[in-house]
Image (cartoon, rainbow, N blue to C red):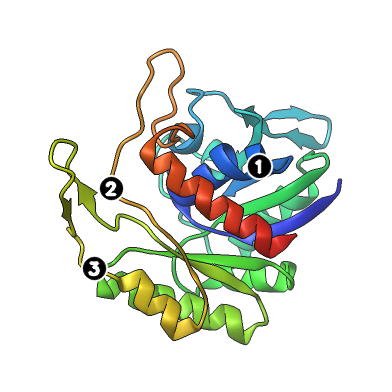
Amino acid sequence: STTHHRLQVGGTTGCNLNYDQLWRLDNGAFYIQYSSSGKLSLCNGGGNVGPKVKGDRIFPVERFDVKVISMAFFVEDNAPVIWRGPMLGKMLMNFFSEVEWGDLDYVLLDLPPGTGDVALDVHKMLPKCKEVIVTTPHATAAFVAARAGTMAIKTNHEVLGIVENMSYFQSGSTGEKEYVFGKDGGKRLAEELNVPLLGQIPLGQPEIKEDDFAPSVYDQTHPIGEHYIQMAKKIIDKTN
């Protein structure tokens, strides 16, 4: 298989960049969720659907034309992953070597925060990987994200920019913004790392459809979906 771009990005941000934006704006993408939370209910819906195994190859789940693999497929529902660093690294290697992805333009890795074993493994396996650092406006979250950004820079990973998630709550009736978790933590982090602020995502909830369950995926016409479109365009410009 051929992959043109590998990005590190977190959680719901990675999910929406993949589905609503990078895939629509460019071509193919897949999403590796490197945690035990949520399976496809976090990113793409699909209930208890899991990957298929044929011989020694694993075929990822495909939803909304995005191919997805997650550690959650290999543990019991909502169970914690109590593994040491080497086991986590081996699992990540298996995701690349044993999963049948096909030809892709983007690979997004959803990694836990900080600079632990998982992050070190990624830096070794993917020395030219680019990163998107996700934070909230809160000073403590930005402090943790700053460590990840500094590690990326020191290991020659390009940081494409900062995404500030849960930036504010905007009233649907008055339009007034309330900065529930503080203000401009992402902006200050971007200035500290000397990288652009790619977007500030407000608190919100996608429309939940009973016949197409995807509780973390915003439609591209949703006001918050439009934020993701603008971020995706910036990322495409920086990677092409």
In the image, taking residue 83 as reference, residue 187 lies left or right, namely left
Looking at the image, tell me whether mark 1 or mark 2 is earlier in sequence order.
1
Residue 221 vs 170, above or below: the answer is above
**Quick one: label 1, few (<14), some, or many (20+) residues within 10 Å?**
some
Q: Which mark is residue 25?
A: 1
Closest to the observer: 142 or 178? 178
Determine which residue is flagged by label 2: 203
Residue 161 percent across, percent down from the top left = 53, 69
What is the number of callouts on the image? 3
**Quick one: label 3, few (<14), some, or many (20+) residues within 10 Å?**
some
**Quick one: label 2, few (<14), some, or many (20+) residues within 10 Å?**
some
Q: Which mark is residue 95?
A: none
Nearer the camera: disc 1 or disc 2: 1
Type of amino acid under label 3: Lys
Determine which residue is flagged by label 3: 183
Looking at the image, tell me whether mark 2 or mark 3 is earlier in sequence order.
3
Looking at the image, tell me whether mark 1 or mark 3 is earlier in sequence order.
1
Q: Quadrant of the C terminus?
A: bottom right
Residue 135 percent across, percent down from the top left = 38, 65
Q: Quadrant of the N terminus?
A: top right
What separation in Å lies between label 1 and label 3 (alpha carbons)? 30 Å
Query: What residue is drawn where x is 68% and y is 51%?
Result: 107
Closest to the observer: 172 or 125? 172
Q: Is residue 161 visible?
A: yes
What separation in Å lies between label 2 and label 3 (alpha carbons)? 13 Å
Dot 3: element: loop
Query: What residue is drawn where x is 48% and y is 47%?
Result: 228
